[in-house]
Image: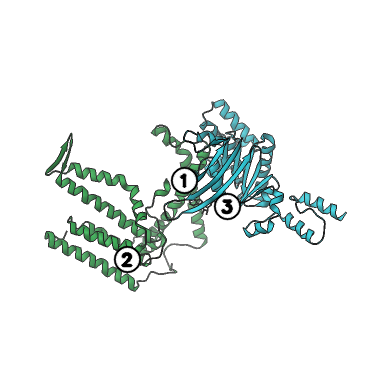
Chain colours: A green, B cyan
């Protein structure tokens, strides 16, 4: 059950997208998100669909796998669709009991759902094609300019990469501890909320203890290897832009430019 | 009264693109009162296999019968099964959570819905069986040594009075003294209660002395299932799958090849000494 969580997971395979510089992918994700909020015309979404489809195709990640990540947020999507559907004023289409569906509401709901789904697909595509280490490397270098104003970029990205690394470990650990307590007759499924919350204590206490133990061990291991933060630290594989990265930048900004032009042409506004 | 595994298969992460078949068509019968060693290299599927026996993992295909009943039947009570087939996980000390040792051991029997008296009686009995000193009973489990913690965790399962006790690598990560303590404790349990014990290990040396049947797993397949003596005649094949027979087996075989009339089936050092003395006399 816990293993269904795919957000932040990496999908190992060979592809151009996997090979891209993480900074390019971060920027690409940002550009894609911006493009989703440009406007509400069908053309914009058609453009975004084509862009997403091409990137997915290039990434060699099975569509099925990307869609699986949506399962975790189905509730969020349904809720926001419902709010838009029932709470938007306008031309009444259907009316029953206390519910009113308007044409505008329907329109809003459809776009909201597409927007959310694309948003999640786009960002999970980034994590699926980028190892956590690469991702934080990219963040550290991409946001390096913030060091000038004393933001501890290196420390933050190190914490991030450790946190990301720990997610699957802790999930696995939870799984193990739950099984061990089940073997001792624990019951996580029956009873009211209070009883079920109480049933989690035998899982949470060992989980916290093990998380602290692991953190402690990791800190020791890092210190034993003379880790001392950012100062004077060099990289074994420094990030360097390649030809494919330049092509990717050009394509993504080309994509954004085309969509903005489309939007200006359709509605006379930039956003 | 027995456990029967009938052609069980198990695949992890079906439908994710990361499928991995951990159990491949395994069948066996375990009778009451047996002391079994389940041996295999890391990743051979031992832990996965034993979780089938108390219904924590459901076979992708095939069935497990406990005392003649199909445990995958819709109205089969898995909770009762888990109290009858006690499973001690690897590093069981990581599951301790209570403020004192005694309370932690009470967790199992309490979950069975027994009256308080009975729960405490069982906890006492279990702690006594694993040989923990009485002055420790009301201390925090987190202050104990590794070997002691592990014995507390084993007591936590024993307190449910299982008919079958399965232990997943109970000696992993312990020093030689801690290891011997645990193994001796199991031998004592076996003599005292006559319960069925399945001991998972990757070390032949550890189990050879204690068990009367060895099951060898390799890459999800049950490769051998026989008495220790017969198993060790395959010591060359065992080596190929990353396992070693006890050192005694090697010495005896070398002696035999050198022309001495010794018993190559000797398992313990004492047996070996006896056989060698007899042959030179
Ligand atoms: N929770 C899991 N998810 C996916 N694969 C697993 C999981 N647990 C074990 N495996 C895989 O199943 C195989 C058997 O593992 P396991 O039963 O733990 O072997 P052993 O206990 O003999 O070391 C291994 O290849 C392992 O990678
Ligand atoms: Mg194991």
Q: Nearer the viewer, mark 3 or mark 2?
A: 3
Q: Nearer the viewer, mark 1 or mark 3?
A: 3
- Residue tagged by mark 3? B221
Q: Could you give the CA–CA distance between mark 1 and mark 2, rounded to whole angstroms? A: 35 Å
Give residue A270's position: percent from left, percent from top.
15, 61
The quadrant of the picture occupied by the C terminus of chain B is: bottom right
**Residue under mark 3: which chain is it in?**
B
Give residue B121's position: percent from left, percent from top.
60, 29
Which SS class for mark 1? helix
Which SS class for mark 3? strand
Residue A24 image label: 2
Q: Could you give the CA–CA distance between mark 3 and mark 2, rounded to whole angstroms? A: 46 Å
Residue A174 image label: 1
Q: Nearer the viewer, residue A148 or A87?
A: A87
Q: Is residue A141 above or below residue A7?
A: below
Q: Do discs 1 and 3 belong to a common subunit?
A: no
């Amino acid at each position: 059950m816990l293993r269904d969580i795919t957000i932040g997971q990496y999908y190992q395979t060979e592809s151009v997208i996997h090979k891209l510089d993480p900074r390019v992918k971060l920027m690409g994700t940002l550009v894609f998100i911006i493009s989703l909020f440009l406007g509400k015309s069908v053309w914009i979404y058609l453009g975004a669909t084509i862009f997403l489809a091409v990137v997915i195709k290039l990434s060699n990640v099975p569509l099925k796998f990307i869609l699986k990540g949506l399962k975790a947020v189905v509730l969020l999507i349904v809720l926001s669709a419902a709010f838009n559907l029932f709470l938007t004023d306008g031309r009444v289409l259907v009316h029953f009991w206390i519910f009113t569906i308007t044409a505008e509401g329907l329109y809003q709901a459809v776009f909201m759902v597409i927007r959310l789904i694309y948003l999640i697909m786009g960002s999970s595509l980034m994590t699926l094609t980028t190892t956590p280490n690469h991702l934080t490397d990219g963040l550290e270098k991409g946001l390096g300019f913030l060091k000038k104003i004393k933001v501890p970029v290196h420390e933050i990205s190190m914490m991030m990469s450790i946190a990301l690394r720990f997610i699957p470990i802790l999930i696995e650990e939870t799984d193990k501890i739950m099984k061990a307590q089940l073997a001792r007759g624990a019951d996580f499924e029956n009873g009211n909320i209070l009883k079920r919350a109480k049933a989690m204590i035998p899982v949470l206490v060992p989980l916290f203890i093990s998380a602290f133990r692991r953190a402690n061990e990791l800190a020791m291991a890092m210190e034993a290897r003379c880790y001392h933060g950012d100062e004077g630290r060099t990289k074994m594989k420094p990030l360097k832009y390649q030809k494919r990265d330049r092509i990717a930048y050009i394509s993504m900004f080309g994509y954004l430019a085309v969509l903005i032009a489309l939007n200006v042409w359709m509605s006379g506004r930039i956003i | 009264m027995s456990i029967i595994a009938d052609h069980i298969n198990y695949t992890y992460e079906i439908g994710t693109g990361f499928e991995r078949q951990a159990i491949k068509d395994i069948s066996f019968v375990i009778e009451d009162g047996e002391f079994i060693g389940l041996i295999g290299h890391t990743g051979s599927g031992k832990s996965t296999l034993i979780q089938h026996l108390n219904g924590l993992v459901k076979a992708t295909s095939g069935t497990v019968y406990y005392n003649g009943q199909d445990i995958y039947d819709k109205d089969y009570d898995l909770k009762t099964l888990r109290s009858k087939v006690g499973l001690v996980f690897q590093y069981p000390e990581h599951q301790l959570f209570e403020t004192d040792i005694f309370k932690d051991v009470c967790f199992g029997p309490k979950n069975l819905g027994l009256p308080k008296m009975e729960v405490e009686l069982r906890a006492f009995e279990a702690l006594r069986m694993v040989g923990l000193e009485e002055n420790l009973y009301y201390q925090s489990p987190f202050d104990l040594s590794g070997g002691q913690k592990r014995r507390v965790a084993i007591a936590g399962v024993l307190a449910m009075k299982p008919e079958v006790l399965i232990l997943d690598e109970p000696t992993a990560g312990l020093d030689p003294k801690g290891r011997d303590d645990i193994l001796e404790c199991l031998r004592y349990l076996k003599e005292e209660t006559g319960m069925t014990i399945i001991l998972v290990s990757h070390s032949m040396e550890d189990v050879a002395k204690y068990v009367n049947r060895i099951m060898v797993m390799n890459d999800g397949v049950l490769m051998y299932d026989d008495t220790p003596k017969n198993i060790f005649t395959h010591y060359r094949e065992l080596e190929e799958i990353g396992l070693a027979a006890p050192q005694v087996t090697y010495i005896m075989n070398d002696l035999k090849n050198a022309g001495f009339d010794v018993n190559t089936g000797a398992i313990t050092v004492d047996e070996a000494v006896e056989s060698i003395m007899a042959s030179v006399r």
